[in-house]
Image: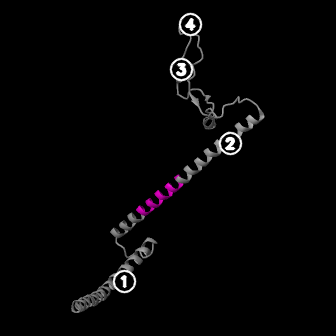
Amino acid sequence: MERIVERYERYTYSQQKVSTDSQQENWSLEYPKLVARVELLQRNMRNYAGQDLDSLSSRELHSLEQQLESALKRIRTRKEKSLQDQNNLLAKQLKEKEKQQTLEEQTQQEQEGLPQTQPTFRLPQPPPQLHRIPSLTIGAGSQHRTGDEETGSPSRPTGSNTLIPPWLLSHVNR
C-alpha cells in the first residue's frame, strides 16, 4: 500500500512540475503579445484624442470616425434615458405634491365648515383668442361680391374666415 501511495505522490509531483514549466513557457510567449496589445491600445487612445492622425490611411480614418460616432450615439442614448428617468421622477413628485395640496385644501375647507362649491380638479386654460384678419388673397374682393348685380349697386366684399393667433398678428401687421 505504501508503494502505491509513493507512486501516486511522485506522479502528481511530476505533473505539477511539468505544468509549472509549461506555464513559464506560456508566459514568455504571452509577454510580447501583451506588450503589442498595450501599444495598440495606447495608439488607439491617442487617435481617439485626435493625436497622431497623420499616419492613418483614409480607410483607417473612416473606421475611426465610425467608432467615434457609434460611441457618441451610445453616450447620447444613455444621457437621454437618464434625463427621461429624471423627468419621470420629477413628474411623479409633482403629482404627489398636487395631490397633497388638494388634500390639504379639502381638510381646510372641512375645518372651516364651508361646503365644497369648487371641484377639486382644475380645468385646462382655454386656447388664446384668435383675431380675424381680412383675406390675404389677391383679387379676393373682386371675385366675391354680393348684392344686386343688375342694379349695379356695389356692396362690400365678403371677408374670409381667416383666423390668426395673437402671437402671429404682430408679424402680419408689419
Q: Marks 1 and 4: which is nearer the front?
A: 1
Tag 4 residue:
151
Amino acid type, label 4: Thr
**With respect to residue 174, does 162 lie above or below?**
above
Q: CA distance from mark 1 to mark 3?
A: 88 Å
Looking at the rendered image, the quarter that the N terminus falls into is bottom left
Q: Place residue 42 in its image quadrant.
A: bottom left
Name the image colouring: one colour
* 81 inside magenta stretch: yes
Amino acid type, label 2: Gln
* 33 inside magenta stretch: no
Structural crowding at the residue carrying mark 4, measured as other residues with C-alpha within 10 Å and reported as few (<14), some (14–19) or many (≥20): few
Tag 3 residue:
142
Residue stretch rendered in magenta on the structure: 69-84
Tell me what residue is drawn at x 61 percent, y 44 percent.
95
Amino acid type, label 3: Ser
- As drawn, the label of residue 101 is 2
Tag 1 residue:
35
Q: CA distance from mark 4 to mark 3?
A: 17 Å
**Element marked by disc 3:** helix
Q: Along the polypeptide, which appears first: circle 1 or circle 3? A: 1
**Element marked by disc 4:** loop
Closest to the observer: 140 or 8?
8
Image coordinates for residue 148, horizontal then vertical, percent: 55, 9
